[in-house]
Amino acid sequence: MIDTQSHSGDRGPLRRILSSFFSILQTRLELIGIELAEEKDRLLMVLFMGLAAMMLATMALIALTALIAIAFWDTYRWQALAGITIVYAIAAIVFALKARSGLRNAPMIFEATLHEFQKDREIFRKH
C-alpha cells in the first residue's frame, strides 16, 4: 500500500510537467495553423491582384502599341516599333528584378511560432 502511494506521488509532478508540455505544444501548433491560414490568404490575394494587374496592363500595352504604330505609320513606323520594344524590355527587366528582390526580402515563415518556441526553450533551461 505504501509503495503504490509513493509511485502515484512521484507521477503527480511528472504528469503535471507532461501536461504542461503538451499544452504548450498544442498552443504552438495552433499558432502554426493560424500563421499558415494567414499566409495562404495573403498569397491568394496577392496572386489574384497580380494576375488582374498583368491582364489589364497587357491590354493597355497592346492598345498603346497599336496607337503609336498607327500615329507613326507613314513616317517612322519601324523606329516607333523598335522604341516601344526597347521600353517594354527595360520595364520587364526592372519588374523582374523587383520581383526577385521581393522574394529574397520576404519575412521568414512561422516567425512568431519560432519566437515562442525560443521563449519556451529559455524558460525550460532556467528551471
Image (cartoon, rainbow, N blue to C red):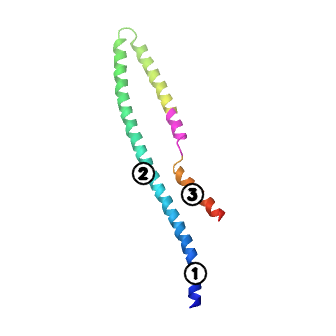
In the image, farthest residue toward the right? 126
Q: From the image, which quarter does the C terminus lie in?
A: bottom right
In the rendered view, tell whether residue 28 sits above or below residue 59. Answer: below
In the rendering, which numbered label is found on residue 117? 3
What amino acid type is highlighted by mark number 1?
Gly
In the rendering, which numbered label is found on residue 9? 1
**Reading the chain from its start, which is encountered first: label 1 or label 2?**
1
Identify the residue at image location x=59%, y=57%: 119
Q: From the image, which quarter does the N terminus lie in?
A: bottom right
Is residue 93 in the magenta section?
no
Residue bearing mark 2? 37
Whole-number angstrom distance, CA of label 2 to CA of label 3: 19 Å
Tag 1 and tag 2, C-beta contact below 8 Å: no
Give left or right: position of 90 versus 123.
left
**Reading the chain from its start, which is encountered first: label 1 or label 3?**
1
**Residue closest to the eye, 14 or 108:** 14
Please report the bounds of the magenta region as a residue range.
98-107
Element carrying mark 3:
helix
In the image, farthest residue toward the top? 75
